[in-house]
Amino acid sequence: MSILPIVILPGFQKICLFAALLVVFNAGCHSMPYNRVEVIDHRPNEPEVHHFEDFDESYYRVRDGGLVDVVLRRQTASATDQTQKIVQIIVLRSFWKPHPGRTFAEASMISANLCYLIMKGDAAVSYEGGGFFQYSENKRKGMITGRLEGADLQLIRGTATGLDIFGKASIAGRVRARRHDRRTTRIINEVDQILGPPPTIQPVHRGPDY
């Protein structure tokens, strides 16, 4: 494990996206700590760049049929301007639930929509798409654990033009969140207030609802 220096990314007014990046070589999704995500930046004719980010807030709420909305949030001060804050929010919305042993499911299928918001000051961008999210809920403890795989994202919404943090990106990670309906709703509303209503993303693959 090695810690990279602060990375200044072009196209985002030289904003430092991550306060610190942890690079874990040959570490897969299953070996990563909970609420750490890996983002792989894919750009034409350039090598892949791997970013790792830890989120310190994680909540979920339950919808009809046991489907869930999960939010991860992290707020830090900008490394280049301590008066500015960098906010990162991930919103996962499941639309069918894989049941191991009962339904066929693999990482190439899509079971959740995903929004990844990155904001500094009034400038914000959102990378969005779908991925395979498998999870289980401990209702007694009010906790959920899950893993996200095979999620491909592209820039969909933003509050300014010319912001280019990633090219096309893929994201994976493990999630552990506690149930907090009010806090989950508040964070989702925060994203919608910044970016406007989310677009309708039609899944490419869909499994049966149970």
Image (spheres, grey):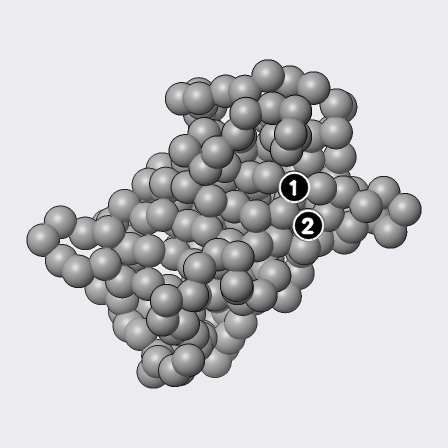
Write the residue at 27% across / 45% down.
Answer: 168
Q: The disc labelled 1 sits on which kind of residue?
A: Tyr
Q: Residues within 10 Å of mark 1 (few under 14, many from 20)?
A: some
Does the residue at mark 1 contact the one at mark 2 (Cβ under 8 Å)? yes
* Residue wearing tag 2: 145
Write the residue at 36% across / 71% down.
Answer: 25
| Quadrant including the N terminus | bottom left
Q: Is residue 19 above or below residue 71?
A: below
Secondary structure of the residue carrying tag 1 is: strand
* Residue wearing tag 1: 135
Residue 58: image location, x then y, percent: 67, 56
Write the residue at 54% across / 25% down.
Answer: 104
Write the residue at 65% across / 41% down.
Answer: 135
Residue 65: image location, x then y, percent: 75, 23
Left or right of 187 on screen, residue 207: left
**Among the 4 quarters of the image, the one containing residue 154:** top left
Left or right of 183 on screen, residue 198: left
- Return the disc, 1 or 2, that comes first in the chain's sequence: 1
Q: Is residue 87 above or below residue 16?
A: above
Q: Is residue 24 above or below residue 1?
A: above
